[in-house]
Amino acid sequence: MSLAMFTLEDDHLVPAEIARSMWKHDQMHGVAVSGALARALELRLTELGRDDLSPARYTVDLFQPATMAPCTVETEVVREGRRICLIDAVLLQEGKRVARASCIFVLPTETPKGDVWTPDDHPKPPPEDLVPPSEEPRVPHFISDSPWSQSFPDHQNAGRKQTWQAGLPVVEGEDGTPFQSVASIADGTSMVVNWGSEGVKFINTDVTLALARRPVSREVGLSATDRVEHDGIAVGTAEVFDRAGPLGTAMVTAIANAGRPIDFGDVEFEDDGSRKPAEG
């Protein structure tokens, strides 16, 4: 299946239907915004010839709703050294800044000798007989108080959630990369930590992704690890993992949006992102 979040027209990224948010019809979701910014940052690193560096910290600020209009991304190399490179990116629509991101790329080296505490228990992907390894577009899988499934209504509960999904290519005709995939899926941390018994009533204002290594493929999982909420502000963190083990962590800050929640109680999706027809 050929499916991507944008088509490329000259230097403009044109959102595809699958980039449309459920918060508002003319709004682009954060997964697409984050993917576009990550792609631009990675391309700039390649232009520098620094394929020796690995993404270590990626942060996105979603300070204005991005619409379904064409957009461009501009990048700036803030600092480049032997062991570290910091690149900034900004997403523009009609000349206005609607989101920005920065990424610190670092040089991998040998792990020092000595023992340091690390958790013994890490989340695992769903069983391969249920979800065979594949980077083809498909509905995300979730586990909560209900077992692994692609049924969104089954997971509209107060249980602790994990998700497993294959990141979509950012631009049609491009394969996409593991970093672009994990950077876009990281926006889904808000779904993992803020989805409760009455749907999603918080909208995230940012995403911070910290990685010890790149994913081995475009398949990535998120597992809720913590959530704190007070006066309509929620902070949630998730462990990021793939089929080879833990990758790092993702964190989102979100603000209450209870007047316009996303209710998944009767919503099911096709693999192309469209809604399944309601039964009956």
Image: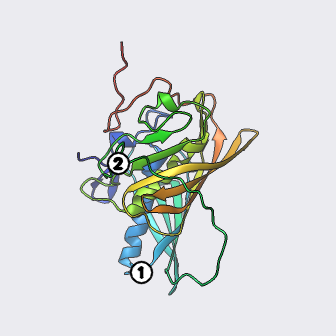
| SS type, badge 1 | loop
Residue 21 percent location from the top left of the image: 45, 38
Q: Residue at x 49, y 57 (%)?
A: 241
Rounded to the nearest angstrom, the CA distance separating label 1 from label 2 is 28 Å
**Quadrant in the rendering for residue 115:** bottom right
- Taking 54 as reference, is 10 left or right? left
10 or 205: nearer the viewer: 205
Q: Disc 1 marks which amino acid?
A: Asp
Q: Residue at x 41, y 39 (%)?
A: 20
Q: Which residue is drawn at 35% across and 62% down?
A: 177
Circle 1/circle 2 CB separation < 8 Å:
no
- Taking 62 as reference, is 232 left or right? right
**Whether residue 109 is visible:** yes
| SS type, badge 2 | loop
Residue 269 percent location from the top left of the image: 37, 32
Q: Mark 2 points at which residue?
A: 5
108 or 78: nearer the viewer: 108
Q: Which residue is drawn at 49% across and 52% down?
A: 124
142 or 266: nearer the viewer: 142
Q: Earlier in the sequence, mark 1 or mark 2?
A: 2
| Other residues around mark 1 within 10 Å, as few (<14) / some (14–19) / many (≥20) | few
- Taking 263 as reference, is 252 left or right? right
Q: Mark 1 points at which residue?
A: 52
Q: Disc 2 marks which amino acid?
A: Met
Examine the rendered structure and indicate whether residue 116 appears above or below residue 28.
below
Most distant residue in the bottom direction: 82
Residue 271 percent location from the top left of the image: 32, 38
Q: In what quadrant of the picture does the C terminus appear? A: top left
Q: For residue 44, which numbered disc appears in the image?
A: none
User: How many numbered callouts?
Assistant: 2
Q: In what quadrant of the picture does the N terminus appear? A: top left
**Whether residue 97 is visible:** no
